[in-house]
Amino acid sequence: MSSEQIRRPRTIAVHAGGAVDRETKAVAPPIHLATTFERGPDGSYPGGHVYGRSSNPTRERLEGALAAMEGAAGALAFASGLAASHALAQTVKPGGRVVIPSELYYGTGVMMRELLPPVGVEVASADMTDPDALRSVVAAGCDLLWLESPSNPTLRITDLAASAAIGREAGAVVACDNTWATPVFQRPLDLGCDVSVYSTTKYHGGHSDVTGGALVVRDEGPLLDRLRVIQNLGGAVPSPFDCWLVLRGMRTLHVRMEAQAASAEQIAGALRGHAGIERVHYPGWGAMLSFEVAGGAEAALAVANGCELFIQATSLGGYESLIEHRASVEGDVTTAPAGLLRVSVGLEDPADLIEDLSRSLRKAIG
Ligand SMILES: *Cc1c(COP(=O)(O)O)cnc(C)c1O
């Protein structure tokens, strides 16, 4: 099959990086565990690989697939989403400035604020849903503009094209954490972003059994070159087995996302009609939602505890539905409303999920 014939994202997700093994004709990709590769008589590397940290055939398949999904120049796989985010943050030189959203994935904010100031990089935040607010924060300097949409945990939507334009004008590298939308629902590189950032732990893996991250970079050039250096020398690379699991998960990304999002929409609708719920946060697409129950943290925890199908656990993107009280996970510095529960909608029958939530809501808050 020639790669030119593969065009549409759903087809790419099924086939990219999936070439039949040349030696054995195995249809499923092999997992290459070798950490080192034989050199040729002249000292060259005829297999194209030198050492496992620098590259690996299984990782190469995954990286090729991640890039193909977004028509990108390259992709780099990491050991976690935060390792990927940190690698990108490390491209900012001392004296530089990173602008992050005022609401974003908790771990990203903590990582930036803990790890960047000690190396001389300033971290500022802006309300990205307001272009004027963003423009004024960026005006004080911006080397890396970090976008996340929908945001965590209240699923605010940022106009990626407008924000990316503001970042580009300021000369910043523009990145978008696209973990929650995935390329199925949103393509940041087509909207002017330089890099799509992923925790592949979530929807790409899809089965809550692998931790991983990725940077998908639109263009060849100094940024991609520098990231390759940081990936190799920083060494936060995923194992071959982890790469294999993420690639396997990607084969069903579209069907999972579409089914989970259809269920999420139904659940959001059912929650909106419920008396004890003050607000439902659902942007109309995607498989994540959150809602705020009357009665604060205590009531919210009672609702989470009362569910039988939804597992009370952090994380998201797996085939199983999860529910989580964010404020108590994040502690003192949380921006999550006290009564907010975050839901990752899985692949169960949505009618069962709605029944489970309704039953728990009735029991906890009437
Ligand atoms: C989970 C998550 C991350 C962090 O990824 P890890 O794989 O846990 O390191 C970053 N951003 C978003 C939006 C996430 O959901």
Image (spheres, rainbow, N blue to C red):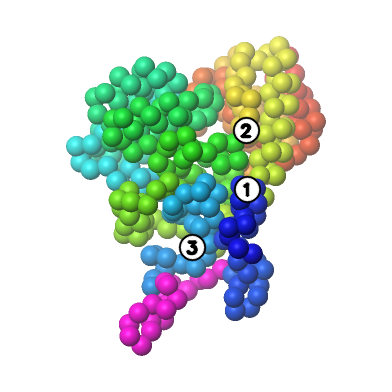
| Residue 246 x %, y % | 57, 54
Q: Which is more toward the observer, 286 or 110? A: 286
| Residue at point 66%, 40% (across, down) | 257
**As drawn, is 173 to the left or to the right of 63?**
left
Q: Secondary structure at mark 3?
A: helix
Residue 86 position (above or below residue 353): below
The CA distance from mark 2 to mark 3 is 29 Å
Answer with the quarter of the image where residue 161 lies: top left
Q: Is residue 40 magenta?
A: yes
| Residue at point 42%, 72% (across, down) | 48
Q: Which is more toward the observer, 85 or 316? A: 85
Which residue is at the far front? Answer: 4
| Residue 297 x %, y % | 56, 20
**Which tag, 1 or 3, sits closer to the chain's start?**
1
| Residue 24 x %, y % | 63, 78
Residue designated by label 3: 60
Residue designated by label 1: 8
Residue 292 position (above or below residue 239): above
Q: Is residue 298 visible?
A: no
Residue designated by label 2: 286
Instruction: Say if mark 1 contacts mark 3, CB within 8 Å.
Output: no
Q: Is residue 175 magenta?
A: no
Q: Which is more toward the observer, 60 or 303? A: 60
**Which tag, 2 or 3, sits closer to the chain's start?**
3
Q: Secondary structure at mark 1?
A: loop
Magenta-tinted stretch:
31-49
Which residue type carries mark 1? Arg
**Which tag, 1 or 2, sits closer to the chain's start?**
1
**As drawn, is 155 to the left or to the right of 99?**
right
**Dot 1: few (<14), some (14–19), or many (≥20) neighbours within 10 Å?**
few
Instruction: Say if mark 1 contacts mark 2, CB within 8 Å.
Output: no
| Residue at point 50%, 71% (across, down) | 33
